[in-house]
Image: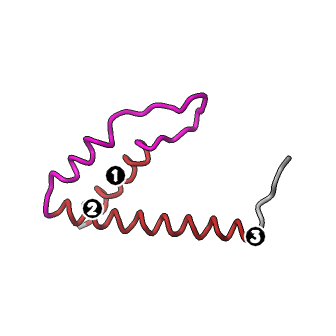
Amino acid sequence: MVIENTDLERRENTDLERRVLAHERILQVLIAHMAESEPKFLDRLKEIFTRHHTLGADEQDFTGTEQYAEQFIRQIEILGERK
């Protein structure tokens, strides 16, 4: 049985995605600012979150939490390089 998303559900999902992206951008800017005053801060985050990549069970296109964290940290590094 296939259940189609209603317009309301799609709008709610879009709203949630925008909120998450906004929070992500705010956190990246805050962490980049913190890394300016304490350079080892970003190194510690990288040590914790950029260890190794493993695929999820039976999922070829699985993206794990660690991979998302590594992408997040890379964006912070890019912000720092722009300054």
Quarter of the figure that contains the C terminus: bottom left
Quadrant of the rendered image containing residue 29: bottom left
Q: Total number of numbered labels?
A: 3
The amino acid type of the residue labelled 2 equals Ile
- Circles 1, 2 touching at the beta carbon (< 8 Å): no
- Residue 27 in the image: x percent, y percent? 34, 64
Of the image marks 1 and 2, the number of the one nearer the N terminus: 2
Q: Position of residue 10 (x, y in %)?
A: 70, 66
Residue at coordinates 49% horizontally, 64% vertically from top-left? 20
Q: Residues within 10 Å of mark 3 (few under 14, many from 20)?
A: few
Residue where numbered disc 2 is placed: 31
The residues colored magenta run 37-66
Q: Quadrant of residue 4?
A: bottom right
Secondary structure under tag 3 reads helix
Q: Earlier in the sequence, mark 3 or mark 2?
A: 3
- Relative to 74, say whether 25 is above or below: below
Disc 3 vs disc 2: Cβ atoms closer than 8 Å?
Answer: no
Disc 3 marks which residue?
Answer: 7
Asked if residue 58 is among those painted magenta in the image, a careful observer would answer yes
**Residue projecting furthest to the right:** 1
Residue in the image at 75% along x and 70% along y: 7
Q: Secondary structure at mark 1?
A: helix
Q: In this rendering, would 32 be left or right of 56?
A: left
Q: Could you give the CA–CA distance between mark 3 and mark 1, rounded to whole angstroms?
A: 35 Å
Q: Pointer 1: what residue? A: 74
Q: Residue at x 48, y 65 (%)?
A: 21
Q: CA distance from mark 3 to mark 2?
A: 36 Å
Distance between mark 1 and mark 2 Cα atoms: 12 Å
